[in-house]
Amino acid sequence: MFLDLYLFQEINKFANKWLLLDILGIFFAKYSGYILVVLLFSFLLLKNKNNYRVMFVQAICSAILSRLFIVEIIRFIYFRNRPFVDWPVNLVLKHEASASFPSGHASLYFAIAFTIFFFNKKIGCVFLITSFLIGLARIFVGVHYPLDILAGIAIGLFSAWIGNKYLRKYIYTLNKKIFALGKEN
């Protein structure tokens, strides 16, 4: 826990020093995730609709599993205060004093990013880098410890792996059946 606090303080110490850095921190911590979600939905408009449709459904299922189930179960069992509750923090982004561990943002966006990575490495890398910046920014603005983000990454990876291992075939089969029915009418 000492290393977790130390890393938090080393990252957070740059907050409230430079306006541009604070603006970037707020953008990545609060708003860039919406861009990832819009990009995820945009895959439904691409040429190879069957493959991207399956990727979209799998990403949504993985995100729901990670954020709404696994994170909430862990938070129910183990409550950890946010850094600004227990320590003097350079708080750049106002946040309620809810549970900090694990990071819901990290688990959600990494579940989406890893799912996309399993389908398309290049686009997946863009999603993974952006998700990493979201996690780093949430530490920077003072609302998460590094361990919260690491746990969120692990949950996101696990959820995407579950989706890739168990859902992909099912979604492909369901997709074929649904669109075969549409062609009959």
Image: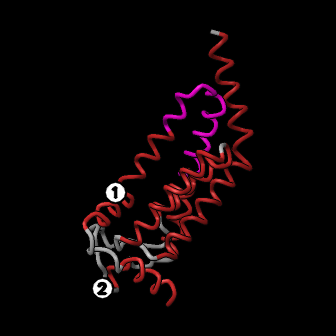
x%, y% of residue 71? 52, 64
Q: Which residues are magenta?
A: 41-64
Q: Determine whether 157 is above or below 80 in the image.
A: above
Res 153 visible: yes
Q: Spatial distance from mark 1 to mark 2, Cα to Cα? A: 23 Å
Q: Residues within 10 Å of mark 2 (few under 14, many from 20)?
A: few
- Residue topped by disc 1: 27
x%, y% of residue 47? 60, 25
Q: Disc 1 on helix, strand or loop?
A: helix
Is 80 contained in the magenta span?
no
Is 55 contained in the magenta span?
yes
Give the residue furthest to the bottom.
2
Res 68 visible: no
Amino acid beneath label 1: Phe
Q: Disc number at residue 88?
A: 2
Give residue 155's quadrant in the image: bottom right
Front residue of this view, candidates 5 and 166? 5
Amino acid beneath label 2: Pro
Q: Is residue 11 left or right of residue 49?
A: left
Which residue is located at x 62 percent, y 40 percent?
55
Give the residue furthest to the top.
185
Give residue 95's quadrant in the image: bottom left
